Amino acid sequence: MKETATDVLRETAELVPRSAPDVADEALAEAARAGDHAAFDEIFERHRRRVARLAGRFFNRPERVEEILQEVFTKVYFNLDAYAPDRGHSFSAWLSRVTINACYDELRRARRRPESSISDITTDEADWINVQLQGKRSNAESAVISRDLANKLLARLSAEDRLVLTLLDAEELSVAEIAVVMGWKISKVKVRAHRARHSLRRVLGEFL
């Protein structure tokens, strides 16, 4: 069965505080903190796919996703003491926070070396835009086109704008959940979301 954005979100992270931590993950984290390398290897095997999927929301190139994957687990390894289950967050929520922040840092660096530009938009993608503007229904093939086009348009935005739109629309997080994972105030998330949508419309307008 094909995964939806909601399915990916639920598998990738639990961003809302829970009443109790994930006992299995916590046990592995505690063992890894004590120097058990096998425990950390288990953490890596258990969570690497979800970290890679989340990183793939922001970056198209496999090598970039792999770099994020390695960076995330390096940070996790050296910062296991920062995971505090007594605060009511699961290990996967903490790991997701580390991943999203790593992606955010890379997005800011990538603004100096964008992966694509408006000039990279293909004829098929231009036709897809026209179909959408005419209010016609899309076929299955257009889902791929729309995803690739969205990535190209998002690449023209600031790191914060791209991050907020991806978490809101692709990962379907709420404003409150984004505030938690980014450590921002809810008012900041709302302002950034408004500005991000305005910026995206401006980028699309430049192309049209």
Image (tube, grey):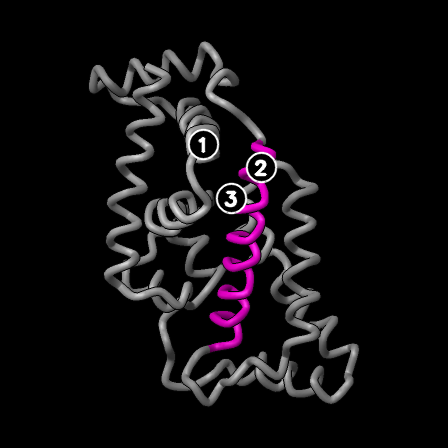
Q: Determine the CA span between mark 2 and mark 1.
A: 11 Å
Q: Nearer the viewer, mark 2 or mark 1?
A: 2
Residue 100 shown in magenta = yes
Residue 60: x and y, percent? Answer: 58, 37
Tag of residue 58? 3
Residue 154: x and y, percent? Answer: 43, 35
Q: Which residue is mark 2?
A: 112
Q: Main secondary structure of the magenta part?
A: helix
Q: Circle 1: is it few (<14), some (14-19), or many (20+) Cα within 10 Å?
A: many
Between 11 and 32, the one lying in front of the other is: 32
* Amino acid type of the residue that numbered disc 2 sits on in the rendered structure: Arg
State which region is magenta: 90-114
* Amino acid type of the residue that numbered disc 1 sits on in the rendered structure: Arg
Kindly identify the residue that appears in the image at 47 percent across and 29 percent down: 152
Could you tell which of marks 1 and 3 lies nearer the N-terminus?
Answer: 3
Residue 121 shown left or right of residue 164 in the figure? right
Between 28 and 2, the one lying in front of the other is: 28
Tell me the quarter of the picture where residue 15 sits: bottom left
Q: Determine the CA span between mark 3 and mark 2.
A: 15 Å
Q: Which residue is mark 1?
A: 156
